[in-house]
Image (cartoon, helix red, strand yellow):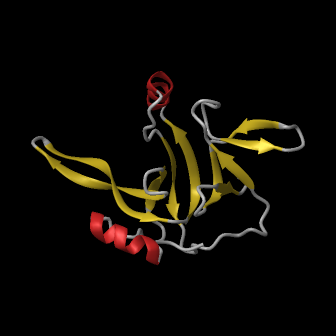
């Protein structure tokens, strides 16, 4: 697993999203379905007529990433819009801290996290022994792979 790969370098240069987060920096990530990659956002200060405010901006695109202290968040209003119109929009994110070590740990016990707005209200993990899904709101460490899969370690 790598951070911004050579295949994404040209894309990031074209779109001016060239800043890879430093280890320890807070980020939020969502799956970019059009570009088939992960879009990484960071909060930036934006000047306004009344002073300033903080907004989320895309800083890079990556094929894979590793986060720590992860929280999974679904914005219900966006989910309802998807259900009502059938059009996809960005409304589900993984919030976390950009990990220093961007390599996955497949030998560590983990679970696969998924989200489908038509089937679940939150991110979920499949429990094989009970043959059902359980809501997942966060994990200690998560790796997001190049195929769009998310794996987390238990808190």
Residue 18 in view of the camera: no
Question: Considering only vertical position in the picture, is 82 above or below 68?
Answer: above
| Drawn side of residue 60 relative to residue 65, left or right | left
- Which x, y percent locates residue 67? 56, 61
| Drawn side of residue 114 relative to residue 51, left or right | right
Residue 150 lies in quadrant = bottom right
Camera-nearest residue between 73 and 128: 128
Camera-nearest residue between 7 and 145: 7
Instruction: Report the residue at 64% width, 31% height from top.
Output: 120
Question: Considering only vertical position in the picture, is 75 above or below 95?
Answer: above
Camera-nearest residue between 101 and 17: 17
| Drawn side of residue 129 relative to residue 134, left or right | right
Instruction: Report the residue at 62% width, 74% height from top.
Output: 103
Residue 45 in view of the camera: yes
- Which x, y percent locates residue 68? 58, 61
Instruction: Report the residue at 43% width, 41% height from top.
Output: 90
- Which x, y percent locates residue 112? 71, 52
Instruction: Check the image and name the residue furthest to the bottom.
Output: 6
The quadrant the N terminus occupies is bottom right
Instruction: Report the residue at 64% width, 30% height from top.
Output: 119
Instruction: Check the image and name the residue furthest to the right.
Output: 129
């Amino acid at each position: 697993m790598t951070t911004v790969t050579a295949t994404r370098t040209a894309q990031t240069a074209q779109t001016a999203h060239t800043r890879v987060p430093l280890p320890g920096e807070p980020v939020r990530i969502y799956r970019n379905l059009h570009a088939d990659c992960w879009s990484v956002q960071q909060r930036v200060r934006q000047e306004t007529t009344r002073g300033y405010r903080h907004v989320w901006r895309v800083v890079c695109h990556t094929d894979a990433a590793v986060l720590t202290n992860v929280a999974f968040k679904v914005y219900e209003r966006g989910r309802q819009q998807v259900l009502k119109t059938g059009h996809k929009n960005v409304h589900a994110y993984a919030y976390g801290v950009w990990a220093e070590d961007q390599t996955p740990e497949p030998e560590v016990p983990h679970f696969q996290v998924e989200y489908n707005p038509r089937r679940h209200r939150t991110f979920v993990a499949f429990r094989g022994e009970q043959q059902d899904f359980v809501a997942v709101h966060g994990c200690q460490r998560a790796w997001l792979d190049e195929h769009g899969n998310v794996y987390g370690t238990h808190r």
